[in-house]
Amino acid sequence: MKYLYIAIISTVLLLVACGKQGEQLELALKAAGDNREELQKVLNRYKCDNEKYKAACFLIENMVFYGSYEGEALELYRSYFVEFSKFPSYRHAKELVDSLEKADGPFSREQLAFKADAKNVDSTFLVNHIEWAFKVWREQPWGKNVCFSDFCEYILPYRIGDEPLSLWREELYEKYNHILDDFRKSSDAQNPIKAAQILMDTLRKENYRFTSLFPDGPHLGPMVLQWRTGSCREFADAIIYAFRALGIPCGTDRVIQRGDTNASHFWNFILDKNGNTYMAEFPYQEKWLKANEYKVIKGKVYRVTYSLNEELAKKKYEYSNFHPVFCRPFFHDVTDIYTAERNRMLTIPVDSLYYTPNNKELVYLCLANRQQWIPVAYSQLIDEKLCFNNIEGGIACILATWDGKQLSMLSDPFVVSSDTGEIHFLNPQKCTHDVNLYRKFYMAVKGYFYSRMIGGVIEGSNRADFNNSDTLFLVKEAPYRLYTVAHLKSDKAYRYIRYRGAKDSYCNIAELSFYENRYDTLPMYGKIIGTPGCYGNDGRREYTNVFDGKTDTSFDFKEPDTGWAGLDMGKPCKVSKAIYTPRNDLNFVYKGEMYELFYWGKGKWNSLGKKKAIADSIVYTAPKNALLYLKNHSSGKDERIFDYWNGKQRFW
């Protein structure tokens, strides 16, 4: 951020690094300049109320690091969310982005001016937030189990990030507090988890529309609860505003880089009456889960705080090669809370490195984002080894140093076993093998769409209502390729044949074709039949998509069960073979498209050449034990690192 008073901030950080925390308040007041009198009014007001005085000091001491953006371009940025919330004016976020950029030009955060809190927050504003925060903390029955330090971090702050300042607490209190009236009379009234569940159930009834296509910009403020659009960051913010307004200790946990896909990620946490962490990915997750039940591959998890991480601030001054990812130290490591028995310490001996780093040089553990490496943790060489604490397995990593401009690779990539924490280095060998590739990207959310086909059945019947139907095929495993051939088990003739989705599958399937003979290449034709209605009720994913010959369209039934799609052949016909395609993310290998395979070796990505696919797979000769990356030059943008293990791609 472009702080106009960067020298004051640097001084604050330096004092923390030197252990002189007592001077932070005075420095923050100095940073306020002409606004110091307003902040002093707050301190004077509470000098006889010990807890409120400490709370005011907590806010003011850290206020020097915060601010918001302003400028005409801010309305352009907000318009993305406003317009996208007007469902169904824009069915696709890409349409909206293109429309707004054509009309007003692209948005950039650089078009905005930064407005520092310390120079602008007045006493009335700060007192309002402090009074309302204490009101809900003390009046709500679950507040009895919230300690003062948790109150300060997860209820008291007047802002989440860099959103415009507003007096949001009273309005949200009046809007949501009545929802918990009956609960406050119950025997569980001191349980914040149950209060949180009731409130989240209410919020989930609204229609939320996710997109990650909008340009990077500041936080939006409490309007996220009204617009209900955006990415995981906006959805997490919505929960925080509503929960903190009712005194439920809540915040954001995040990963700088996920261990299984090309993205950072945010979600909400709350604390139970014993201080234990529960989490939810709002609005998709129905119930709050214990943190160690969250199974997404995270690698490293950090909790966002309002207050400065003093230990991290010290590192900033102890080491010259401090990476920008860690330069704003307002988070702390909570990986162990999420990983429990899966928590690992990685130990890398110096003889596994390309060279020996200086003892005063930080070494970064990096995860992949496409063909780039993103630092997520750091360590230093001690006793001829590097140790990284609190790491979740199931990830592929690399070690690097930072010279202020770029990363320099310090090791070969290595994978960390999720079961044992064992490390295996992927150093390409001189010997080669053929790799048969079907995809360029990880099967989303552990095969979410693909796994929904497990338990689905192909059925034949001579009645339109499918009474007395015969099961001709059962899908036993998630499809691995674009086209999967199923040989049907029946010699009977059927007029009606269909695919019926498994329980809780929303009958997700993209394409289906039937063949009279297992050697036929031309599919059979008939009248398309099925259960009408799709998720979202926008007509985009009806049952008719299953027979439109397009693998990028699919059926997504409006109900989790009872959905099906099939053909009326007009007369009984024998059917010996079916070919099906799962609902997908367009990341299979497609015939006619141009691909290029890379392997990592000698500190860089090396090309194995371009090829045009002639089927739904593509074959390359690649070094054994190599980290690989398949790029599609014809379409799409999602690609992910993988190795070749037991004859299959293993994505990381």
Image: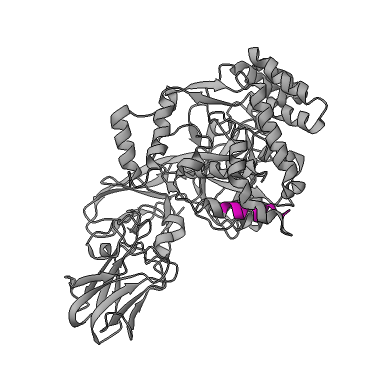
| In this picture, residue 613 sits left or right of residue 475 | left
- Residue 522 in magenta stretch: no
Percent from the top left, x then y, of residue 290? Answer: 63, 56
The overriding secondary structure of the stretch rendered in magenta is: helix
Percent from the top left, x then y, of residue 64? Answer: 64, 23
Q: Is residue 201 above or below residue 45?
A: below
- Residue 191 in magenta stretch: yes
Closer to the camera, 626 or 576? 576
| In this picture, residue 408 sits left or right of residue 572 | right
Percent from the top left, x then y, of residue 161? Answer: 56, 33
The image quarter containing residue 319 is: top right
| In this picture, residue 523 sits left or right of residue 607 | left
Closer to the camera, 184 or 2? 184
Percent from the top left, x then y, of residue 345? Answer: 64, 49
The image quarter containing residue 570 is: bottom left
Specify the segment rendered in magenta: 189-200
> Which residue is pictured at 27% across the width and 83% down the height?
463
The image quarter containing residue 54 is: top right
Closer to the camera, 392 or 531? 531
